[in-house]
Amino acid sequence: MAVVMRSGEIRRYDANERLIHWIVAILFILLTASGLAFFHPAFWFLSVLLGGGTWARILHPFIGVLMFVFFFVMAMRYWGDNKIQPYDREWGKRLSDVINNRDDNLPPIDKYNVGQKQLFWTMVVTMVLLIVSGIMMWRPYFAGAFAIPLIRIAAVVHMLSAFVLIVGIIVHVYAALFWVRGSLRAMTRGTVSRAWAKHHHPLWYRRMTGGGAE
Amino acid sequence: MPSMQSLDIQLRSATTTASPQVRTAGEPVAKLIDISKCIGCKACQVACMQWNDLRDDIGTTVGVYDNPIDLTDQSWTVMRFAEVVRDDGAMEWLIRKDGCMHCEDPGCLKACPAPGAIVKYANGIVDFISENCIGCGYCIAGCPFNIPRISKKDNKAYKCSLCSDRVAVGWAPACVKTCPTGALQFGSKVDMVARGEKRVRDLNERGFQKAALYNPKGVGGTHVMYVLQHGDRPELYNNLPSNPTISPWVSLWKGIAKPLMALALGVAALGAFFHYITRGPKEVDESADSGGRPATRHDREV
């Protein structure tokens, strides 16, 4: 498969990667809606999305297992690209430049920036915590096998992990949909423009184009 | 159990606004279980089954008197038998009628995520409104006494209702009605506390110096109280907790974390929006493709 398309655009995600990303995304939305409904009465109305409270209770854990499985199939693919590199440290120090859109001050990076990498590892850790604590709370199938004091701790772990994950995804969605223009098409059509790649991920751009400018 | 008049509901699960309060409805009630008078006949278990139309599966005898061996969705009260050897070598049979304690500060209600699935009536009775129950089992995690049980039949939680339907029409709970020794009594909480304390003094005079009324403050007091011969050691009575409270984990989970984290989620979403409004997007100049590293357009006035 060509990395640089005939149009001059650069391939970032292939069809399978896009498909699995959106499967995970849809499952995440369903889980967040039902999970928030159990968490706070202010979000109870979201349980309607899954067919009411009882259906939300029945479906939430099954959807959770699906998300866990699909997430890790996806994560295996991105594992190597998300290892923290020496140059990431420098990028990470300039958070103020990142937030204030002073991109010229940022050192060149590869396929993912530190923010993306941190989100990746946050998701890996929270997904594991969520599946373990979730199984411990899963009625009627598994919760009966665990001592009640353990289930209470599991509930807190589940809540905190979900909170961290949801905040992370809020940032992820904001960055991809609104903040960093030209990113969304990487996950919808699979490609980004040369200029986008060169600007945001210069080292990756060089790898994809075999040297090139700069 | 069916809901009584909504006017009589004082606390309602997963509800952030106040319940109706204008009516000064009935005074708090209580059931007093005097363990020193209990003979372990299990008539209360039978009466509970009969009144509430419950029929547990026939179980297996495991060599003790406890039967059924535990609370279930069909057995809302069970007698727990403890053989205790006293310091003087004598054997004592401590028989505790286990079931919902009807806490003034109910952990089950605090933990319940389904609006109106658990209510506390103005008279203190904590009741499961089963039609609103979603079967998540949070009440089990919330309860300091390990009382609620999820039915295998319908995946809903059940427990003693203190016969809220009988109490609503001025009757005593079925177990109290049937108790042959007067070990079970029912009335206003004030009266039951007075009666319990009188019995404790009585027991003190008969050699049980540590006798006490079990009305634990950690859960705000209970609407089911015990007279214990050994009030200093409640754990003798099949591990009755000596100082029951809602677990700190549950308090964190269903207390302070709820408003704080809900607020934080809102702040995160709003923060993203405000960032967009003030800093704007990172846009790449597509025409600068062949040149050096293109600059970001700065929307912000510096």
Image (cartoon, coloured by chain):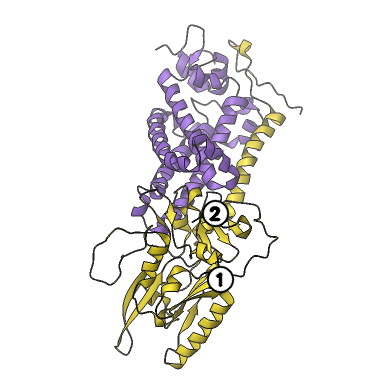
Chain colours: A purple, B yellow
Which chain does tag 1 point to? B
Could you tell me residue A161's position as x and y percent? 49, 45
Give the residue type at disc 2: Lys
User: Is disc 2 placed on a helix, strand or loop?
Assistant: helix
Of badges 1 and 2, the one in the foreground is 1
Picture quadrant of residue A13: top left
Quadrant the C terminus of chain A occupies = top right
Which chain does tag 2 point to? B
Give the residue type at disc 1: Val
Asked whether B293 or A125 is in front, the reply is A125
Disc 1 to disc 2, C-alpha distance: 27 Å
Camera sees residue B283 = yes
Left or right position of B65 against A112: left
Q: Which mark is residue B8?
A: none
Asked whether B30 or A121 is in front, the reply is B30
Do discs 1 and 2 belong to a common subunit?
Answer: yes
Asked whether B209 or B194 is in front, the reply is B194
Q: Residue at x 44, y 52 (%)?
A: A154
Q: Residue at x 45, y 84 (%)?
A: B211
Q: Residue at x 36, y 71 (%)?
A: B79
Could you tell me residue B186's position as x and y percent? 51, 74
Q: Residue at x 50, y 16 (%)?
A: A189
> Compared to B218, does A27 lie above or below?
above
> Compared to B111, does A34 lie above or below?
above
Left or right position of B166 against B85: right
Q: Dot 1, how many residues are within 10 Å of its Cα: few (below 14), some (14-19), or many (20+)? A: many
Residues under numbered marks 1 and 2 in contact, where contact means CB atoms less than 8 Å apart: no
Could you tell me residue A19's position as x and y percent? 43, 22
Left or right position of B28 against A6: right
Q: Which mark is residue B254?
A: 2
Camera sees residue B221 = no
In the rendered image, which residue does mark 1 sit on? B29
